Image: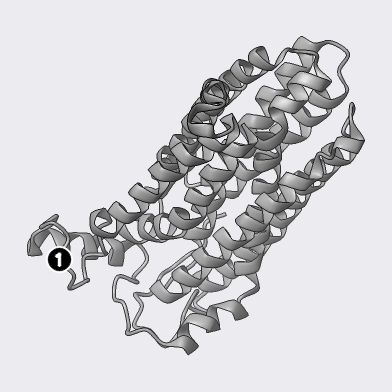
Amino acid sequence: MAALRVVLGVFEAGFFPSCVYLLSTWYTRYEVGKRYSVFYLLGCVASAFSGILAYGVMHMEGLGGLRGWRWIFVIEGLITCLLGIAGYWLLVDFPDSKRKSWSFLNEREKAWICARVNADRGDAKVLPFSMGNFLRAGLDWKIWAYAIIFFGTTTISYALAFFLPIILTFNMGFDVGTAQCLVAPPYAFAGMVMFGLAWYSDKYRHRGAVIVINMLLCIIGLPIMGFAKSAAVRYFGVFLVTAGANSNVPAAMSYQANNIRGQWKRAFCSATLVGFGGIGGIAGSLVFRSQDSPNYKPGLYACLACAILNIILVGILTLNFRRLNAQADRGEKELEDSDEDYQPGFRYTC
C-alpha cells in the first residue's frame, strides 16, 4: 500500500500543478469546486482500491526474479510514465494559446470562454512571461497562507494513506488481507463527502467554511481513531479523518483559485500550493513512526495540530477578506490590482 501510494504521489507531483492551474483558468470561480473534486475523486478511487491491488500484486512475488513490492513500482510506474508522455499532446491549452489542441474549440467558442472568464474575474488576457511578474506574486502573504493550508491538508491525507493499513493491522488487530480490504470503504465515503461539499461551496459561494468543516471532521475523528477502546469505533474514526483530509484537497485548491487574479500570479500560486503539498507528503510519511506503536500518539498530535492550524489560517484570511471587500465596496481600493489590464469589481470569497 505504501509503495503504491509513493508511485501515485509521483504522478500527482508531476500532473497536479498543470491541472490545478488549467482548471482554475478555464472555469469561473464558482465552477471550480465540483471540477476539482471530480479530478481528485480519481485519486480517492485509486486510494480505495490501492490496498486491494497492492495485496494482489504482492502475489507476483518471484515472477521474473522480482519481489512483489518491485512489481508494484514497475506496473504503476509504467502507467504513470505513459500517461505523462501522452499528456503533452492531450492537455488543452487556454483558448488564447496559438498551439493547436486537436481542434478542440473554434474561434467563436474560444471567444465565449474568454468572455466568461473576463466577466467573472477579468484576467483572461495573458501578458508575455516576465520573471518579475511571476516572482512578484510571492510578496503577497496570502499566497503562503494558502500553501500552508495545503501543507496541513496533505500531511494528514498522506499520513493516513501511508499508514492506514499498518494502523489497521498492528493497532486494531486485523490481519493483512482484511486490513488491505478495509482501506476501500473510508475512501469511498470520502469521495461522497468531497463532492457533496464541493457542490455546496460552488452553489452558495462558501470556501473557507468548507475547509473548517473538513478540519473539524479530522479533529473529531483522530481521537476516536487513536484512543477508542473498540476496533469498530476506531474504524468509524478512520471514516471521519479520511473524509475530512481528502475532501479538503479540492476545497483548498478552490479556496486559493477564487482569491487570486492574474495568470502569472495564478501560476506562481499553483506551484507553491502543490510544492507545499509535496512537503506535506514528506511530513506525512514521517509522523507515524514504528517506535510510537501501538498508540502512535505523536502522529495523531501532529495531524491534530495541522487541522487546528488550518482553521486558524482560514479565520485570519476570512477577517482580512471581509475588511478588504468592505474597503472595495466603499470605493477605497481595487482588489488584486496590478499593472495588468483587469476588469474592476473583483471581490474575495470567504
Q: Quadrant of the N terminus?
A: top right
Q: Is residue 340 left or right of residue 16?
A: left
**Vertical relation: 168 (above or below) 97:** above
Q: Is residue 212 left or right of residue 99?
A: right
Look at 46% across and 33% down and name the residue there: 195
Q: Nearer the viewer, residue 346 or 59?
A: 59
Q: Can residue 27 be seen?
A: no
Look at 71% across and 17% down and name the residue there: 236
Look at 72% across and 60% down and name the residue there: 316
**Vertical relation: 208 (above or below) 55:** below
> Which x, y percent locates residue 116?
25, 60
Q: Can residue 284 be seen?
A: yes
Rate crowding at label 1 as few (under 14), some (14 to 19) or many (20 or more) other CA atoms within 10 Å: few
Residue wearing tag 1: 100
Q: Within the image, what quadrant is residue 18 found in?
A: bottom left
> Which x, y percent locates residue 5?
58, 39
**Vertical relation: 128 (above or below) 113:** below
Q: Quadrant of the C terminus?
A: bottom right
Q: Nearer the viewer, residue 119 or 12?
A: 12
Q: Is residue 74 left or right of residue 290?
A: left
Q: How is the image coloured?
A: one colour
- SS at circle 1: loop
> Which x, y percent locates residue 199?
44, 36
* Residue type, numbered disc 1: Lys
The image shows a total of numbered marks equal to: 1
Q: Is residue 304 left or right of residue 62?
A: right
Residue located farthest toward the front when viewing the structure as drawn: 65
> Which x, y percent locates residue 140?
61, 76
Q: Nearer the viewer, residue 206 or 158?
A: 158
